[in-house]
Image (cartoon, rainbow, N blue to C red):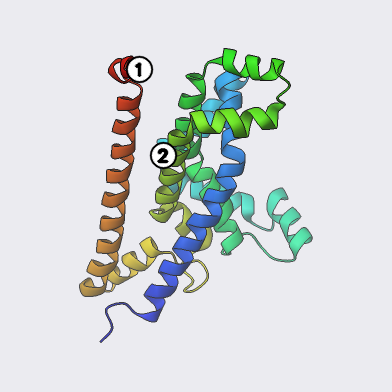
Amino acid sequence: MDVLTEQDWLAIKLTLQLALVTTIILLLIGPVIAWWLAHGRSRVRNMIEALVAMPLILPPTVLGFYLLIAFSPNSFIGNFWLQLTGSSLTFTFQGLVIGSVLYSLPFMVQPLQAAFNQLDIKLLQAASSMGANRWDQFFNLIIPLTKRSFLIATSMAFAHTVGEFGVVLMIGGNIPGETQVLSIALFDHVESLNYQQAHWLAGILLVFSFLLLWLLYSLQRNNQAANSPTAHAKL
């Protein structure tokens, strides 16, 4: 008897695919939002910051419920997507991606926002005076100075997407090979009292979470050591 069934492997593949696509999208929009929250002066900044952080404390089923309503063909968003693509957002991989992006957004934005807050603006002003445009400043100055924060934010967003349950269940259902991710497959095995398979899937998530947290804490300590007064004195 195989340790993992074909359906389990499909769930693992779909989970990794969802986490990868979600993380790539977050890497495109997360830094922009984080920079605006760190250095913007808009009156609505506090409101946007609260909206971005809401998934940290909001029950996933609440977010999933409202996304399910928003994605339905009877809503403006759902109907627009249906007219544009010919398919529904509910119970599809595309719907899972959008829900995952919203749910994992604070895990990308907040580490970057904290890093951007610590940047010396005078460095950017000096680069600008030397003719560097915003793209040059971002790729040649901001990213090198905050690369550890980018790595931490990327890892957290990826891991958070891997462990999603409530949001993806609400908007994606439980369709094997299409919307059934690893956490939902684990729930199915527990519900059917198939504890042997559940142990394997839970073990995969447990080991993955531990190794990732170990990496993140190591990076954080290395970052603190590199920025310590002793390290600067040696330089």
**In this rendering, would 106 be left or right of 195?**
right
Q: Residue at x 46, y 25 (%)?
A: 114
Q: Distance from label 2 to label 1 (Cα)?
A: 23 Å
Please determine whether, in this image, residue 222 is positioned above or below residue 123: below
Q: Position of residue 112 (x, y in %)?
A: 49, 31
> Which residue, given by chain and number where applicable, does mark 1 sit on?
232
Q: Residue at x 42, y 36 (%)?
A: 56
Please determine whether, in this image, residue 157 is positioned above or below residue 228: below
Name the quadrant of the N terminus.
bottom left
Q: Residue at x 40, y 77 (%)?
A: 7
Amino acid type, mark 2: Ile
Q: Position of residue 210 (x, y in %)?
A: 26, 50
- Locate residue 46: give its quadrant: top right
Name the quadrant of the C terminus.
top left
Determine which of the numbered discs, if any, sits on residue 32 in the image: none
Amino acid type, mark 1: His
Q: Position of residue 30 (x, y in %)?
A: 56, 37
**In this rendering, would 80 be left or right of 221?**
right
Other-residue count near label 1 (Cα within 10 Å), few / some / many at <14 / 14–19 / ≥20: few
Q: Secondary structure at mark 1?
A: helix
- The mark that comes first in sequence, 2 or 1, is 2
> Which residue, given by chain and number where applicable, does mark 2 sit on?
152
Circles 2 and 1, Cβ within 8 Å, touching? The answer is: no
Q: Position of residue 67 (x, y in %)?
A: 56, 49
Confirm whether residue 51 shows in the render.
Answer: yes
Residue furthest to the front in view is 235
Q: Residue at x 32, y 64 (%)?
A: 187
Other-residue count near label 2 (Cα within 10 Å), few / some / many at <14 / 14–19 / ≥20: many
Residue in front for this viewpoint, 112 or 52: 112
Q: Secondary structure at mark 2?
A: helix
